[in-house]
Image (cartoon, rainbow, N blue to C red):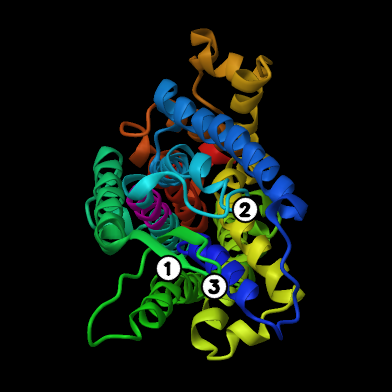
Amino acid sequence: MDDLSQINSSLNKLINLSTNTSIDYKPYSERLETYIVPIVFACIFVIGVLGNGTLVLIFIKHKNMRNVPNIYILSLALGDLLVILSCVPFTSTVYTFESWPYGETICKISESTKDISVGVSVFTLTALSADRFFAIVDPLRKLHSGIGGKRATRCTIFIVTAIWLFAILCAMPASILSYIRVEEDNVSVSFEYCYPYPPIEGYPNYPQTVVIVRFLVYYAVPLFIIACFYSLMARSLILSTKNMPGEMQGQNRQIRARKKVAKTVLTFVVVFAICFFPQHLFLLWFYLNPRSDEDYNDFWHILRIVGFCLAFINSCINPIALYCVSGTFRKYFHKYLFCKMSSGIINSRNPNNRRFHRPSTYSSTRKWDSISTAHHPNHIQMNNFRRTPQNDPMTMATEVTKITNGDQLIM
């Protein structure tokens, strides 16, 4: 996503000049991608604005959704909105015009906001995976450290703020160094394109270095860390299932509840990995292969376009994935996008439904804990230790995991 506009113009010029290339030059008006890519980007813009905008609206209007996992999800939505609003309208024309038509200011904004958005996405997913790891493997950790309720929320906001500042810092080179590069072919037809790698005297391999660093920082290293967290989570869940007492084996609902939020995060990670893999693959091949100009063929041409589109599709697909895996968010999407009020939302707003009586059985006790903590997370938090029969360790761990992290709210 960083310099595909440059590659697009550069390759077109090289194809014009080359007489032994395997691809014949075609005018833009005769290329299929000239018409398909703008349509794809129009869909990305509409779906991305509606989906991510709705996520932000849900977070603003409903206090019960302002928990630790959802703060990270809000950060993802804001990062996606940033690139959709500031970049998609301009970058969508890369396959329509021979040259970059918007000037150097838009070039710098476009390149930097893309880097910020990618950084926020991958760093937030890494932090969210770490949060799920501690919630499942060591659910009492936040209570042991004295962090609970509002303090946990403040800690998460601090982490998200640090992620944004670090992403902005990583995007500074693109905002400063990007410029309009002008080249001419053998018939004096000039090409202008937005190029993020300025000529640096004494450092001819600067573009190759930046491509490798971006691959490591924005893709390989974060995904490796996330894979480690999920491997440890899977191991912990398997061991905890085997070590459960016989009478607890029937409590599969508790185990499913702990897994569901982790699966939601894993869905985001898989989507990110799939969307950005083709782009990184093409950029590494193009800049590290000395014969990329001669080896460029139909396969790399298609991969270039697919990678270009998928990198932006990632900005609109997270709300769709969340709609599919989260029943709570699905209800709110129905309310705001389809004007359909869910019974679950109606019940949560009805003050009469918040009244409850002292439970007399084990099952009703657990139901009382689940409902009450949804409305009073800071005051009921420790009551589970007194109201849960026999203070069973597995039950307490599960309940504390739900309370301190708000897991039940995104299921």
Q: Is residue 9 left or right of residue 112?
A: right
Q: Is residue 48 left or right of residue 376?
A: right
User: Three-letter amino acid code at disc 3?
Assistant: Asn
- If you read the primary sequence from the N terminus, does the residue marked by circle 1 or circle 2 appear first? 2
Looking at the rendered image, the disc whose residue lies closer to the viewer, 1 or 3, is 3
The residue that appears at 28% across and 53% down in the rendered structure is 159
Q: Which residue is mark 1?
A: 218
Cα gap from disc 3 to disc 2, whole angstroms: 22 Å
Q: How dense is the environment of label 3, judged by Cα within 10 Å: few (below 14), some, or many (20 and up)?
A: few
Q: How dense is the environment of label 1, judged by Cα within 10 Å: few (below 14), some, or many (20 and up)?
A: many
| Residue range corresponding to the magenta coloring | 108-117
User: Three-letter amino acid code at disc 2?
Assistant: Tyr
Question: Does residue 368 appear in this view?
Answer: no
Q: Which residue is mark 3?
A: 186
Give percent across and percent down for residue 199: 30, 75
Q: Which residue is mark 2?
A: 95
Is residue 123 or residue 366 the one in the foreground? 123
